[in-house]
Every structure is written in structure tokens, then in C-alpha cells.
Image (spheres, rainbow, N blue to C red):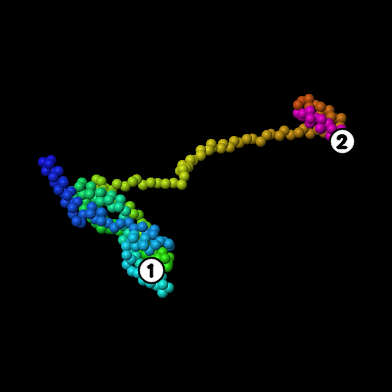
Amino acid sequence: MKSHSVANLLLASLIAATSSGCAVVMAAKQPDYKNVDLFKVGTPRGALLGEFGHPTATDTRANGAKCDVFSFTQGYSGGAKAGRAFVHGVADVLTLGLWEIIGTPTEAVFSGSTVGYETCYDKDDRVQTVILLTPDNDGRGPKNVGPAAPEVGGSALAPAPMVTTNGPVDVPTTATKEPIVLQNVAPPVTQPQPVVTGTPQQKLQELKGLRKEGLITDSEYQQKKKEVLQAM
């Protein structure tokens, strides 16, 4: 029973790998990546022909300049194509060929993009002017593009969302203030100053009596005494 299952697995893998429309073959036959950095002033025309092949159109302008139009499909590096083919092959084996339902349409979509350039040359056949004919695509996109990672357990593996901040997060704290207690403080009681009447001699005698009884201080006694003497 075990050997029968292994044989079926190998047979399914062989069928998947040798299918003319399988994702493995499509990935391996994807167009190559072209060095679009050659489209710059000073590049020899021969270098462009070697990288992009014969131009789709060539003409000579009124000023005598020769111009080429290059139209090509920008593809992927050899490493990217090999990696994609390997992933498709492993997925075919693990799914007994069912991966082709996903892999083949994927390779059909990611089959490169069309890019166009026009170049004109000087008398030495070196690039003098470059015009991009496909403004939305200059051919400088990613050259190492592989297939999407297979889903595991029916759900795609995705990283947890990352939250970024511009600095440490300050948690506001509520300051606790002690209650302010207002106390009713009675104003100081001002004792009325004793009034001294009579003749200067009587006033002085009364002032002595007041000081003796403690009703006035020594400084008050001296002040009042001075006032009485000045009034005489």
C-alpha cells in the first residue's frame, strides 16, 4: 500500500513537471531582464543592439540623424526565474498537481511588461537623445519577482500589523492636589488707648499710674509724656 502511494505521488509529480502549460515551464520561459540603464547619452548603438536585439523601426531624420525604436518585454533575472520554477515544482509535488490551478494563471499574469524607447545617434553612432515611449513603465521595476507564497492551512501567512510612533508614548497622569482648607481667623482685637485729661501735672501723674498698672507700655508712656511736656 505504501509503495503504491509513493508510485502515485511520483507519477503525479512527473505529469505536473512535464506538462507543457505547467507553471514550472512557464516560469523558466519568462522573458529575461534587460539592462535599460543603457538608454543614456553616449551609449554605442552596438551595445543597444546586443542587449535588446534589432529595433522594431529605424529611420533617418531630416537632419541626417539615425533613430531607432526599441520595443521589448521586460522580464526577470535568471535567479528569479529559477526560484519561481522551483517553488512551483515543490508546490506541484505537495498538492499532486493541484497547484497548477493557482500557479499557471499566476505565471500568465506575471509574464513581463512591454517597454518602448526611441534613440537617436550622432555621427559616431552613439546615443544622442533618448525618449521613453511608455511613460508609465521605464523598465526599471523589480527584476527579482517571485510567485506569491502558498497559503498554509487555508489562510495566507501575514505579518502582524506594525504600529509606529514618532517617539515615546506619554501616558498622561492626573495630578492629585491636596484640598485647600480655608480657616476663619478672627482679626486681632485692638485695645482702645486710654485717654488722659486734666492739667499737665495730672496728665503726667495719670500716665505713671497707667504704666504702673500695665495699661500702657514704657514706649507709649515716654511718647505720651513727651507730648504732654511739649504742650505745656
Left or right of 67 on screen, residue 84: left
Three-letter code, disc 2: Ala
Quarter location, residue 20: bottom left
Q: Which residues are magenta?
A: 215-232
| Residue appearing at x 25%, y 49% in the figure | 86
Which residue is more in the foreground, 171 or 111?
111
Q: Sort mark 1 into few (<14), some (14-19) or many (20+) by Cα contacts within 10 Å.
A: many
Residue tagged 2: 231
| Residue appearing at x 34%, y 58% in the figure | 34
The N terminus, quarter of image: top left
The answer to whether mark 1 and mark 2 are in CB contact below 8 A is no
* Badge 1 or badge 2: first in the primary sequence: 1
Three-letter code, disc 1: Cys
Q: Is residue 72 visible?
A: no
Residue tagged 1: 67
| Residue appearing at x 41%, y 64% in the figure | 126
Provide residue 168's location: percent of width, then percent of height.
Answer: 46, 43
From the viewer's perspective, is residue 59 above or below residue 52? below
Which residue is more in the foreground, 147 or 128?
128
Principal secondary structure, stretch drawn in magenta: helix
Secondary structure state at the residue bearing disc 2: helix
| Residue appearing at x 24%, y 50% in the figure | 88
Q: Sort mark 2 into few (<14), some (14-19) or many (20+) by Cα contacts within 10 Å.
A: few
Left or right of 145 on screen, residue 222: right
Which residue is more in the foreground, 39 or 143?
39
Q: CA distance from mark 1 to mark 2?
A: 128 Å
Q: How many marks?
A: 2
Provide residue 65's location: percent of width, then percent of height.
Answer: 41, 70
Q: Is residue 83 visible?
A: yes
The C terminus, quarter of image: top right
Residue 97, disc: none
